[in-house]
Amino acid sequence: MEYQNSTKHRRSFGRKLFLFLTAILLLFVAFSLMKKLFSDGAITSDNQIALVEVSGMITDSRETVHQLENYRRDNNVKGIILRIDSPGGAVGPSQEIYEAVASIRKDGKKKIYASLGSVAASGGYYIASATDHIFANPGTLTGSIGVIMAFSNIEELIGKIGVRPEVIKSGAFKDAGSPVRPISKEERTLLQQLVDDVHEQFIEDVAKGRNLPPDDVKLLADGRVYTGRQAFNLKMVDQLGGLQDAIDHLAQQAGIVGLPQIVEEKEEIPFLDWLLQSSLQKGLSQTLARQKSPALQFLWTVP
């Protein structure tokens, strides 16, 4: 009798396990099918607004430019919103994103807006200035129109541990900014000229994007940050409001009737990881990577 009960129990457990695994398999198939339908455009709307996020340090432009170009060519997308939450970053990538945004604006086929989050300073504001319309929250920290090149001098530390650097170079300025010796007067002049030239580029591009006289922008370009409300009064932003305000305004300008479909590219997550992951995100904040060597940056920093 005990043997029969044990056998029945195993069979019952086996059936339940089979049904559970079958349900998981069907869920996986359904999930994959729906994902493919949406990604292939089988289920789409021609009233789409694309959302492109620029968050954290701007160190690379490729993904952002890639998204912008895809949405630029997509006829279902009637407008694009750059959601910016960034203190800025490297000059080159910031300029590449600016040019991609400016190209969409110049093309004129669809509007591109900026929605500024908690911080959109320096390089973050730089790329926003290329858009058709900028929304900022009253408390957004923005502006910081300036350029920085930072160096560290560890000459005294090296002396304490008994290391004596020897440098062989091909030109007088080849090791300008070396951390093992003070910057010479000539080097400081040279590096200041680099910073000043890039700063002038920053001012010119913001003036062009905002349709403001360069001299007016220059008065604002001493590196200071402004609140969203201050920036609005200074004509640095067009309107006060959050992301939803930007979506509503853009939808109206694009002639979208009813609620727009918001589309954005998400990181690919394997099905089992998606199924098992907890509600906690991978991290509460993004760690800002330190540069291995000094570089020109559109960056707002605090001590």
Image (cartoon, helix red, strand yellow):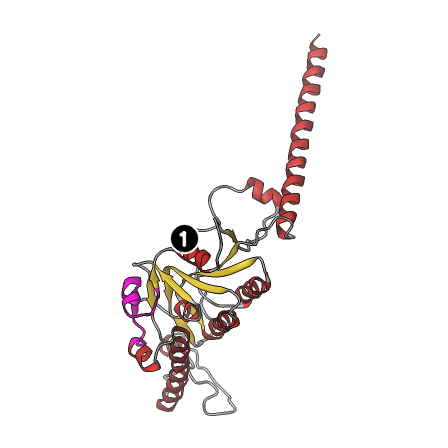
- Which residue in the protein does label 1 denote? 244
User: Is residue 235 located in the magenta-colored stretch of the structure?
Assistant: yes
Taking the spot 43% from the left edge, 67% from the top edge, the residue there is 132
Observer-nearest of 220 and 296:
220
Q: Is residue 65 left or right of residue 122?
A: right
Q: Which residues are magenta?
A: 220-238
Q: Is residue 4 left or right of residue 231?
A: right
Q: How many marks?
A: 1
Amino acid type indicated by mark 1: Gln
On the image, the x and y values in percent for residue 62 come to 55, 67
Observer-nearest of 150 and 113:
113
Observer-nearest of 212 and 188:
212
Instruction: Place residue 141 in its image quadrant.
Output: bottom left
On the image, the x and y values in percent for residue 14 come to 69, 24
Q: Is residue 122 above or below residue 253?
A: below
On the image, the x and y values in percent for residue 293 come to 46, 75
